[in-house]
Image (spheres, rainbow, N blue to C red):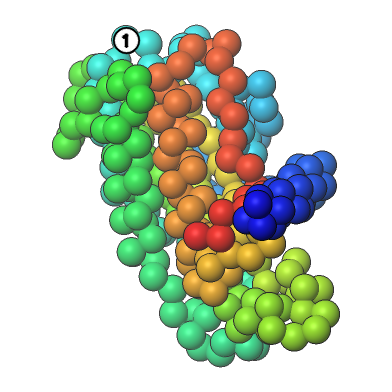
Amino acid sequence: MKTTKLILPILTLCAAILSGCANQELTLKAHHVAPSAFLENPGSLSTQKQRAPFDTIWVDPSHPDTGAGYKSVYIAPVTTQYLRPVNRPLVTVMEGPKAKDRPVQGTADVVRNSFIKAFRTSPAQRFQVVDRPGPGVLVVEMALVELNPTNVIGNAVKYGAPGGEALGPITKGNVALECKVRDGATKKLLLQFADNEQDKFAPVSLRDLSSYGHARQAIYDWAKEFEELLRTPPSHKVVGASPVTLNPF
């Protein structure tokens, strides 16, 4: 009985937090970032939330169902050629040179491996992952554009000092990705998208104490969303991951 009395208030509090935060999801979503030179004709990309949760996307109008006619997908190594410098002044001041010591190649590998895994473990597998482009193969090319660390020191202060929660908005990191999909034989561009994600909001999160824990979660979310996009028809809406979570891990 005591346990039940304790659990009910906790559940009520959690529901209230989620409800309040859900109403603010638009403000919790990271802002769009400027396109890099990796994208082709970036002005053609637009927001299409009825189809995909990404900031902007373009789909070849002559081939609206990108996956139609293809049985395989090749995930190319992720380029870091267009990666911008760290642009978080507070994290640079508080963490010094360590803030610029980013796991760039490691993160690029996480992107590629996560996308490969998403296709291999799809709940409704449509494509076989192959190790080279060719006829009947969708080629996925990606660029890591931004990678700003979570301000671990700032978050430690946020949790440990009275009024520290005010630091929340300025301790967030972000990760931005751009993606292009081509025909493996003709190299014709079929789809491209760009998205930027910042640290999820949570009352308490262990990822707040990890420089790139939030970035890795955003990458996992992207991989699942992209796989769903390619295997579903244009009428299907891919719902993005919420920027709010109660999961502390």
Q: Is residue 34 visible?
A: no
Amino acid identity at mark 1: Gly
In the image, residue 123 sits, relative to residue 106, either above or below, namely above
* Residue at position x 48%, y 53% in the image: 217
* Residue at position x 44%, y 79% in the image: 101
In the image, residue 246 sits, relative to residue 42, either above or below, namely below
* Residue at position x 39%, y 66% in the image: 104
Please provide percent x and percent y for residue 89. Answer: 68, 79
Please provide percent x and percent y for residue 112. Answer: 32, 47
Q: Residues within 10 Å of mark 1 (few under 14, many from 20)?
A: few
Question: Which residue is tagged 1?
Answer: 69
- Which residue is more in the foreground, 102 or 163? 163
Q: Residue furthest front?
A: 1
* Residue at position x 66%, y 57% in the image: 2
Please provide percent x and percent y for residue 11. Answer: 70, 48
Which picture quadrant has residue 51?
A: top right
- Which residue is more in the foreground, 237 or 64? 237
Circle 1: element type:
loop
Q: Is 47 displayed left or right of 186 in the figure? A: right
Which picture quadrant has residue 86?
A: bottom right
Please provide percent x and percent y for residue 32. Answer: 68, 48
